[in-house]
Amino acid sequence: MPRIHWKLPDGGHLSDEVADGINLMDAAQFAGVSGIAGECGGCMSCATCHVVVDEAWAARVGPASESERLLLEASPTPAQARSRLSCQIHAAPELDGLVLFVPA
């Protein structure tokens, strides 16, 4: 199981092992990561699971889809070049050690 690291706006961080195939919004909520609301339940209609992928991981995670980018533009927190919806990123062995920043 890959270990995922969430960096929080207050400087704190949480890490958890996530079973392959689980989306990282669900994983964040299960791990108690504050700032990942996931109000739509992962249906990609709210952008409340916005994260920013660490630069070192951007190529492995891949870019946001066009639908994600449109939602992220409406996010209360301004989107960045590496912004993604965590509901659209799924745990996989190649993401072991992934670092995600939770926007303020």
Image: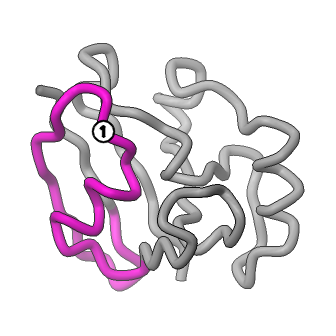
- Mark 1, residue position: 22
Give me the residue at 27% from left, 72% from top. Answer: 33
- Is 78 above or below relative to 88? below
Q: How many marks?
A: 1
Give SS at disc 1: loop
Query: Picture coordinates of residue 18 (x, y %)?
Result: 17, 40
The stretch in magenta equals 7-35
Quadrant of res 10: bottom left
Quadrant of res 29: bottom left
Query: Which of 40 and 101 lies nearest the eye of the viewer?
Result: 40
Query: Picture coordinates of residue 48 (x, y %)?
Result: 58, 74
Give me the residue at 78% from left, 35% from top. Answer: 65
Q: Is residue 94 magenta?
A: no
Query: Picture coordinates of residue 12 (x, y %)?
Result: 23, 75
Give me the residue at 80% from left, 62% from top. Answer: 71
Q: Is residue 9 magenta?
A: yes
User: How was the colour assigned to the protein in this rendering?
Assistant: one colour
Farthest residue, direction top: 94
**Structural crowding at the residue carrying mark 1, measured as other residues with C-alpha within 10 Å and reported as few (<14), some (14–19) or many (≥20):** some
Judge from the rendering whether residue 2 lies leftward or rightward of residue 59; answer left or right.
left
- Is 34 above or below relative to 21? below
Query: Which of 72 and 8 lies nearest the eye of the viewer?
Result: 72
Query: Picture coordinates of residue 56 (x, y %)?
Result: 48, 29
As shown in the figure, which amino acid type bears the numbered disc 1? Ile
Give me the residue at 12% from left, 50% from top. Answer: 16
Q: Quadrant of the N terminus?
A: top left
Quadrant of res 103: bottom right
Judge from the rendering whether residue 26 lies leftward or rightward of residue 66; answer left or right.
left
- Is 6 above or below relative to 33? above
Judge from the rendering whether residue 103 lies leftward or rightward of residue 82; answer left or right.
left
